[in-house]
Amino acid sequence: MNILATTLDPASTSFLASVMSSAPFDHETSDKWFLSLYHSSQHLPESLVVPNRAFLAEPVKVDTWYDSALGRTNLVLVVRSKDIDARFRQIEAMGYPPTVPFSEFIAHLTLVWGVPGLTRANKAFINSLNMTFNRQSGNILGFQGEFLLNADGYSPNVDGQKFFVDRRQLRK
């Protein structure tokens, strides 16, 4: 599978790193955070990449997502972005078949790959993250650049995404 992805800009990286610094569990460093813009089983050419493209996104919810393809639970930050949605549609219109149709696509940033069990402390931390984003409504995250990733043999399980986000919230 080929993935077109983007990373947080420096200000958003700093903000999320400071929020995650109080996590009661080990987590990825910010250099491992990326947001998948598009997944395709077909080869995505380097010519699709726009290195200086910027995206803005609004945080919607932090939650866990069990990925049966990887056999682990991840902590993800779901975002809403007309820019990201438009980029998905643009690549799809070029004829590259998505592994996840637009109606199932949920833009998200994985904060922790393989989050530990949901203890009371871990649940409280996740709730505090959601309160942080809700309290600061209008808080916008910036993403910059695009790059390609190759994830041979991986196919995301979108069924796991259905339980925590109402897709209508994402298309406002």
Image (tube, grey):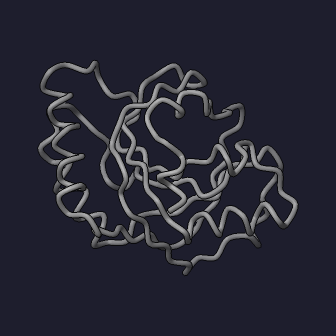
**Is residue 78 left or right of 25 when viewed as pictured?**
right
Q: Which percent across, then down, holds residue 102?
A: 69, 51
Q: Residue at x 39, y 28 (%)?
A: 114
Q: Which percent across, then down, holds residue 151?
A: 65, 41
Residue 118: which quarter of the image?
A: top left
**Is residue 2 left or right of 37 when viewed as pictured?**
right
Q: Which percent across, then down, holds residue 46?
A: 74, 67
Residue 82: which quarter of the image?
A: bottom right
Up/down of 52 relative to 25, above or below: below
Q: Residue at x 56, y 21 (%)?
A: 68
Name the one closer to the observer, 28 or 129: 129
Up/down of 6 relative to 76, above or below: below
Residue 11: which quarter of the image?
A: bottom left
Q: Residue at x 31, y 72 (%)?
A: 10
Q: Check the image and name the residue furthest to the right.
A: 95
**Is residue 93 left or right of 152 when viewed as pictured?**
right
Q: Residue at x 56, y 71 (%)?
A: 83
Up/down of 38 relative to 93, above or below: above
Q: Which percent across, then down, holds residue 17?
A: 23, 55
Name the one closer to the observer, 163 or 62: 163
